[in-house]
Amino acid sequence: MLAQTIQLALAPVFVLVAIGNIMNILTARLARMVDRSRHLQTLHAGTKGSEHDGVVAEMRVIDRRIAHIGRALLCLVISGLAIGTTVAALFLSELAGADLGIVIAATFVLAIALLMVALVLLLLETRLAAKTLRLPPELLELERGDL
């Protein structure tokens, strides 16, 4: 029976590995945004007019992106804790002979739901990044046709 419990615990553990990988992606993105925001903060005081407006606009976007990443990381951490609780409940259920099926199901569903929320937040952040990083049409020289 313990061998079956170990086998059952493998699926949540694979989800935990996926959560860790996504957290690595998010923290790398966050680090780049923090570096960029620090650079913009140094530019902020030395700019005027439209250049200053551009710095402020980019800082605002980065602030929104950082908020999305922060929320996504929070969801992933809680999801990871829920996965850990799921695995612990699986083993407690087996070792103590208690029926913890509802706890196991609830914590696993919670973990997957939070993982999905984190992925939606990542999607929002990447869409925001892509939207703000689009090249201005005048630089693309579209009137020249295919090159």
Image (cartoon, rainbow, N blue to C red):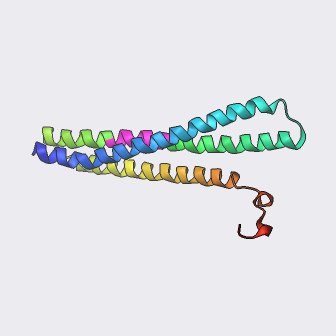
Q: Is residue 48 left or right of residue 127?
A: right
Q: Which residue occupies the foreground of this view, 136 or 5?
A: 136
The residue lying at 42 percent from left, 52 percent from top is: 113
Boundaries of the magenta span: 73-83
Is residue 145 covered in magenta?
Answer: no
Q: Which residue occupies the foreground of this view, 10 or 87?
A: 10
Indicate whether 38 appears above or below 101: above
Query: In x, y percent, where is residue 7?
Result: 18, 48
Q: Quadrant of the C terminus?
A: bottom right
The residue lying at 78 percent from left, 62 percent from top is: 141
Q: In the picture, residue 98 is in which quadrant?
A: top left
Query: In x, y percent, where is residue 80?
Result: 38, 41
Q: Is residue 18 left or right of residue 40?
A: left
Indicate whether 33 appears above or below 117: above
Indicate whether 93 appears above or below 133: above
Extreme residue toward the right, this view:
49
The residue lying at 20 percent from left, 49 percent from top is: 8
Q: Is residue 137 visible?
A: yes
Q: Is residue 31 left or right of residue 60?
A: left
Query: In x, y percent, where is residue 76?
Result: 44, 43
Q: Which residue occupies the foreground of this view, 94 or 74?
A: 74
